[in-house]
Amino acid sequence: EKGGYAHFMLKEIHEQPRALRDTLASRLDVSSGGVKLEGVNLTSEEARSLQKVVLIACGTAAYAGMAGKYIWERLLRLPVEFDVASEFRYRQPLLDEHTLALVISQSGETADTLAGLREAKKHKARILAITNVVGSSVAREADDVLYTWAGPEIAVASTKAYLTQLAALYLLALYLGRARGEATWALELARELACAPSKVEKIFDLEEEIQELASNLAPHEHAFYLGRGLDYAVALEGALKLKEISYLHAEACPAGELKHGPLALIEDGTPVIALATQEDLLEKMLSNIKEVKARGAWVLALALEGNEAVAQEADRVLYLPRIHPILSPLVSAVPLQLLAYYVAKARGCPIDKPRNLAKSVTVE
Ligand code: M6R
């Protein structure tokens, strides 16, 4: 049932090009930049009347939502509030009928997410869900549902669900952008999105190198993930993957915050994973890499092909297929999943069922 792979997690990582294709294919019209989303029924008038979006999700689903915040705010110019469901539900959030509550859950059964959904409903927000399980509680209670076609995810660590949640967020950006009538970027985004699955496939050419890099990381007890903008959202997900399955302490830090505290933890040999895919922020990231290098850090950078300057600063660089910077999480998340997998393997961890964790958190 693991299809020849040693673990479900590795199988699911490798299923991602297929999962992405399934989630995108029947919905995306590349010739017009339009989308057809069965189950999502906001009229133009409803879409235009939205004043803000609040995210309701936990863990990896919340980090997909955080990437969604950067993506939607940039494309739709609509404010998106980010916090995790367990904070959202207790902070007396301000919502009304002009709020879109974006609920993201692989299982559709997470207790805090469901409670957040109900809280938002009480305030008459429109509930839009992204979930992987047909007929799940979240799907039943939402006004609109967009399914991810990841297929069953068995490993506790979420991989293909995350990638397809991102895909759903891009599809919804296209949907809402056109419904709100401000989508000059739609055609280009749709075209680039259609090419994403084959770019994800190319990441597997790096797998052996990632395995070798993982053996450098495995003996350490701490690792830092740095990023700016969208890269920061992916850094959070990368760090979560590593701590969850390899039990190595990993911390994601917005690169601009280094000097405000975390830099004190960098010493000789500290591993730093620096995400540098956002070209408008590249200069800033390069100076952050220099900053940690000067304190002795060992830096593994992730950059898009062609950004040779990164190789001059970092110890090692994984070059990823060129993609529109707004789509970069689709290619940058995958090497981080593989890195976490191979570190956990080198440390002899029970990868598919990490200690203390359950696949679906249905209690608070
Ligand atoms: O089923 P859900 O998407 O609602 O689950 C949310 C989190 O429990 C889940 O993403 C968790 O963080 C994963 N173990 C991360 O890999």
Image (cartoon, rainbow, N blue to C red):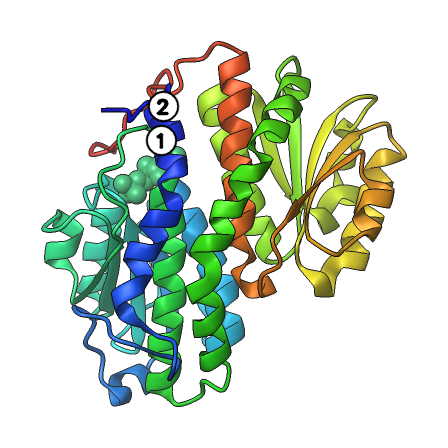
Q: Can you tell me which quadrant of the image ligand 1 is in?
A: top left
Element carrying mark 2: loop
Whether residue 2 is situated above or below residue 294 in the rendered picture: above
Toward the right, the furthest residue is 294
Label 1 sits on residue: 11
What's the residue type where badge 1 is placed? Answer: Lys
Residue drawn at 55 percent across, 64 percent down: 326
Determine if residue 91 is in view: no
Whether residue 251 is situated above or below residue 280 in the rendered picture: above
Residue drawn at 22 percent across, 79 percent down: 42
Res. 5 mark: 2
Where is residue 98 drawn, in percent x and y? Answer: 30, 78
Alpha carbons under labels 2 and 1: distance apart: 6 Å
Q: Are marks 2 and 1 in contact (CB under 8 Å)?
A: yes
Q: Quadrant of the N terminus?
A: top left
Where is residue 116 drawn, in percent x and y? Answer: 26, 52
Residue drawn at 34 percent across, 18 percent down: 356
Q: Quadrant of residue 146?
A: bottom left
Where is residue 224 drawn, in percent x and y? Answer: 66, 33
Quick check: 101 left or right of 181? Answer: left
Q: Residues within 10 Å of mark 1 (few under 14, many from 20)?
A: many
